[in-house]
Amino acid sequence: MLHDMLESIKSDSDAVPLTPLSTKFLQTAPHQRTHFVAVYRENPLKRQTVITALETLKKSHPDDDAISCLIIGTENKDMYILDPEAFTVLVKQSLPSQPVFLRSTGLYDVDFRILVACRNGNILVMKKGANTPKFCITLNSHPIGIERIGKNIVIATMDKNLMCYNNKIKNLWSIPMPNHITCLASMDFKAKTFKGVLVGMDNSEIRVYRDKFLVDTMTVPDIPAMMQFGKYDREESTLIVITKSGGLHIFILKRNVDLSQGLASASVGPSPKQFQKLNVPRKTKTFVDQTLREREHGVTMHRQFQHDLYRLRLTTARNFAEALEKKMMPISNSNFAPLKLAANVQGIGPMFRLTVEIMNTSTSHPILGAYVCLGHKRHPVCPGEMLYQFTTASPLSHIYS
């Protein structure tokens, strides 16, 4: 009975997760369950978990030395925000999957946002006062790291891609990497107002990117597993790298380093061809006079153009109506003889050839015993016979005469 009850609780997705002791009871053989209960019945049920992600959130002031709240992500799909003074839980939030990376912006007492990268490849956003986190991004692969650079979100995935999204969750760019990414870190070089990302790869190489442009590369003795850029002792710009073998490496960035050279080699900005002068001819006196005339009489010229356009439309409409009235259109509007006629003259005289193309536009009725009558006004033109009878015109067929 106890086994069936625990199985129903485990299969229910809305129920409370089982403790490790209850899970172990479900895994025991049926003949050992009585002995298992007798041994562990006095032990209290405890749900122990492990921390999967850590992050800090400024409480009330954005200064570097201000008090920060601790954000903890656990294996049982929970996220906690702890008070830095009393160590009490300020916020507890359940997540759809285990959090692996946390990034925060803002102040806890004012307004904040927390980016949560989950193990199932989804990126969530938690805002102040929200009951549930908001789902925003679905990745094609598992995340390796997530960083917030200004108003953009930079994400590294296991399929060797570095992607960037804006606040409206629109993909701005995506860069394929030549090797697998092992870690990701943000870089804020305040002396040169430089903000970028550091990408560590499994070939012991660290790349520096600003937006989607490669600025610099460096090589470390081993595969980097974790990186952090910031202040160390008296140095404001220090990179600390922990390698896969357990080594610790500290790199100090020179204060007079010029990272703009890497951006220049990456061809940031407009193409140099845009600054090449074009061979434009000099302005003539006629062009200058015409420009002055258009500037002084622009309204009058526009009105005259509109007047001529209206007259053109009126003349076209009149000619079309006259063609319909006098049966001068090459297409017949009769239901009994729906024909389309086209005539071509070959030659300029005194001998020429007249080719008449007739098409039956009907889809079901043939035309029998129809005639073609030729008429002319000028006396020198002598077409010979004036009346021609053509053979049967099948539906949607052509006849040439």
Image (tube, helix red, strand yellow):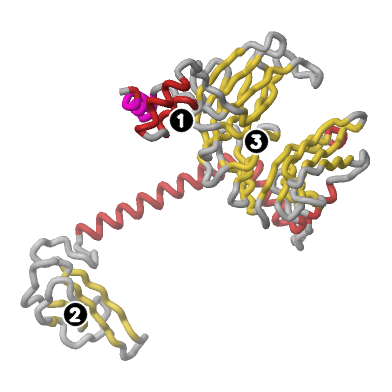
Q: Dot 1 surroundings within 10 Å: few (below 14), some, or many (20 or more)? A: few
> How far is mark 2 from mark 1, CA to CA?
91 Å
40 or 353: nearer the eye? 40
The residue pinned by badge 1 equals 24
Amino acid found under the numbered disc labelled 3: Asn
Q: State which mark lies toward you, 1 or 3.
A: 1
> How far is mark 1 from mark 3, CA to CA?
45 Å
**Looking at the picture, does residue 251 appear above or below residue 220?**
above
**Looking at the picture, does residue 158 appear above or below residue 324?**
above
Where disc 1 sits, the SS reads helix
Sequence-first disc among 1 and 3: 1
Magenta-colored stretch includes residue 339: no
Residue 304 is left or right of residue 227, and the answer is left
Q: Quadrant of the N terminus?
A: top left
As drawn, the residue found furthest toward the top would be 86
Mark seen at residue 152: 3
Q: State which mark lies toward you, 2 or 1.
A: 1
Amino acid found under the numbered disc labelled 2: Ile
Q: Quadrant of the C terminus?
A: bottom left
Sequence-first disc among 2 and 1: 1
Amino acid found under the numbered disc labelled 1: Lys
